[in-house]
Image (spheres, rainbow, N blue to C red):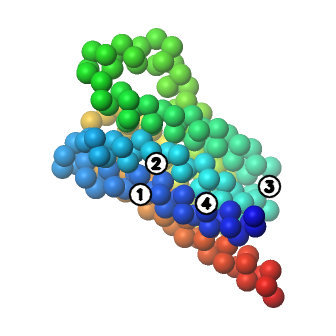
Amino acid sequence: MSISWLLRFGAICGVLTGLSLGIPGVIEPFTGETPATSFVAGIGGAFAAPAVTAFHLRQRAAAGRLGAIAYAVNVVGLGLFAGVAFSLNLVVFFLDESTASLVLEGPTRLALLGSVVVFVTGVVLFGLSMLRARVLPWPAAAGYGFFLPLLAVLAPLPDTVLTSVVHLLGCASLMWLSAATWAGAVKSEEGTRA
């Protein structure tokens, strides 16, 4: 398996992760959270780690030690947050309110909050490492480091136009990073042919 294959696979996963933010962001201001949007949001986190791995591979030479540490914290945070998103969107969403409240008390609440802290820390660090490396487009890197943590902070609030805009900006950041990563795979492949 070549690096260009991993970059392309990760870029596709980045698009799928972006769509898992963007689709609910477009629909939920009008409908609120629905089983369909909850499903899309719950499944989308599964594609985040391969996407971030590709982003890291694309910039690893320029990212240095900060990039490696940021990637490690980010990928662990994404794994935890994917579990949170899956649980909240595909399990808790379908429970009655009193059962959901019971499930989310005690150690579960602490685990969820801890997961969010690791996720936010990892995303911010990785966003900073992308900005510092200057390999991927800086607006997309800044959007990644700002809008994704903001989504985690806004998640407990009701769906509004603001949360939808943040979903869409996070989606756009991931799409742009994915497109740049795909382009890097093409350049990498062309370089090996020459």
Q: Residue at x 59, y 38 (%)?
A: 79
Which numbered disc covers residue 64? Answer: 3
Sequence-earlier tag: 4 or 1: 4
Please state which amino acid type lies under the numbered disc 4: Gly
Please state which amino acid type lies under the numbered disc 1: Leu
Residue linked to disc 2: 44
Q: Residue furthest left?
A: 30
Mark 1 packing: few (<14 Cα in 10 Å), some, or many (20+)? many
Can see residue 144?
Answer: yes
Q: CA distance from mark 3 to mark 4?
A: 20 Å
Q: CA distance from mark 1 to mark 2?
A: 8 Å
Please state which amino acid type lies under the numbered disc 3: Gly
Residue linked to disc 1: 19
On the image, the x and y values in percent for residue 168 come to 37, 57
Q: Residue at x 25, y 47 (%)?
A: 28
Residue linked to disc 4: 10
Sequence-earlier tag: 1 or 3: 1
